[in-house]
Amino acid sequence: MRTVLTYGTFDLFHVGHLNLLNRARAHGDQLIVALSTDEFNLKMKNKVTAIPYPDRKKILEALRCVDLVIPENNWEQKIEDVLKHQVDTFVMGHDWEGKFDFLNEYCEVVYLPRTENISSSEIKTHISKGRTTQIKAAV
């Protein structure tokens, strides 16, 4: 059985998140998602999530492509998670390209293309500016 691991905040869940998770799952038989906690987002990423961790976790757990959700509490836990869960493939969006190559010693590292025209940040900006038109459909 091949195990895949990815990390993310998955705030304001959208089709880009779903596409990434489905593509990640296609690399193995089981997908583990390390979900950034609210505290980690605030202290380390300087981001406040719109949706609290327990709700984001429930959303991810409801997806067929996700087998297990674990908390991401710090930047340093990746090697420990890879070893603990016997991960074969570590997957992230291409905007992180090269940042996790140090994991190649422990597993395969894959950077997947992100879905164009969609991001949680873009959605937040769209709402905050009170725009009256929809965001372009994701490709």
Image: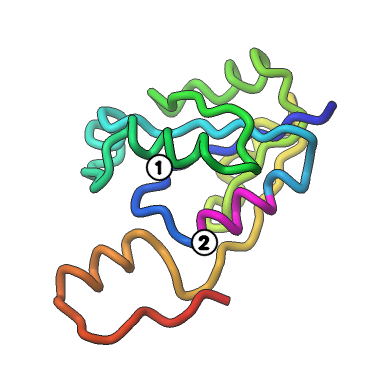
- In the displayed structure, 116 sits above or below 90; it is below
- In the displayed structure, 35 sits above or below 93; it is above
Dot 1: few (<14), some (14–19), or many (≥20) neighbours within 10 Å? Answer: many
Q: Name the amino acid type tagged 1.
A: Thr
Q: Nearer the viewer, residue 109 or 50?
A: 50
**Mark 2: secondary structure:** helix
Q: Name the amino acid type tagged 2.
A: Gly
Mark 1 = which residue? 9
Give the residue displayed 41% in from the left and 63% down from the top. Answer: 119
Identify the mark at residue 115; answer none if there is no mark.
none
Left or right: 75 as drawn, with respect to 88: left
Image x and y of residue 102, in percent: 64, 32
Predominant secondary structure, magenta span? helix
Range of magenta residues: 16-23
Q: Nearer the viewer, residue 99 or 26?
A: 26
Mark 2 = which residue? 16
Dot 2: few (<14), some (14–19), or many (≥20) neighbours within 10 Å? Answer: some
Image x and y of residue 43, in percent: 23, 31
**Mark 1: secondary structure:** loop
Q: Earlier in the sequence, mark 2 or mark 1?
A: 1
Give the residue displayed 23% in from the left and 36% down from the top. Answer: 42
Image x and y of residue 76, in percent: 47, 23
